[in-house]
Image (cartoon, rainbow, N blue to C red):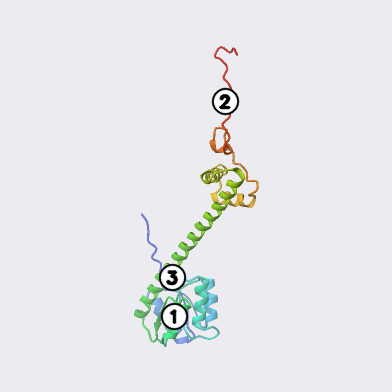
Amino acid sequence: MSTVDTAPPRILVAEDEAIIRLDLTEMLTESGYDVLEAVGDGRAAVERATALQPDLVVMDVKMPVLDGISAAEQLGTSGVAPVVMLTAFSDKDLVERASDAGVMAYVLKPFTIDDLRPAITIALHRWNERKALEVEIADLGERLETRKRLDRAKGILMARLGLDEPGAFRWIQKTAMDRRLGMRDVADAVIAGGAAPVTPTRTPEDPAARPAGERPKPAPPRAPADGKR
């Protein structure tokens, strides 16, 4: 029977005003969140988030040493954690700066836990969507690069071994199977030594083992059943 992970989100709090920092920590803890640590400036927020790898950072926009938006941008760029921004301002420029910095949600002061809960949920959801998209894009890029290398290797094989394109593809495929390698590994080897690709191990009966246009060799004659020649 499978179990569902119900562990509460692990949160780092970053707020320069000590009273608000304590209240916020208490508010989150009483609501079931796991507050890992609370810090008082933006640089400390970046350093501790990088070290602790929380699920989320709740951070004030105006802080000493490094402001909240700059700290959020660093966290987002490095892929450490999503940020819920706390602010007493609601002007358009601030919202745009926060969005450009990668802030997933923001909450206006004064706030209650009822304001924080949906913001935390939204931030985590948007972050997970972003990470999933990054994985998908990376996978597409990897597949495109593999195809480009296979096409280049096929061209080399067609020129050096006199194969047509399907034959070159089968050559790569069979070599990969014979040597227990990935097709991209074989393609890279062909590209690296394209002037003299190594022929994979094949049996004489394998049509792919013969150069293009070569006829199969006749089988040796069988001896008569009585042993006479």
Distance of label 3 from label 1 (alpha carbons): 14 Å
Return the residue nearer the eye: 21 or 115.
115
Residue that sits furthest to the front in the current view: 213
Return the residue nearer the eye: 43 or 138.
138
> Circle 3 is placed at which residue position?
127
Distance of label 1 from label 2 (alpha carbons): 80 Å
In which quadrant of the rendered image does the C terminus lie?
Answer: top right
Disc 1 versus disc 2: nearer the observer: 2
Q: Which mark is residue 85?
A: 1
CB within 8 Å, label 3 to label 1: no
> Circle 2 is placed at which residue position?
219
SS category of the residue bearing label 3 = helix
Distance of label 3 from label 2 (alpha carbons): 67 Å
Residue 22, image x, y percentages:
45, 83
CB within 8 Å, label 3 to label 2: no
SS category of the residue bearing label 1 = strand
Which comes before the other along the chain, label 3 or label 2? 3
Q: Say which residue appears at 60% left-offset and 43% top-offset.
A: 161
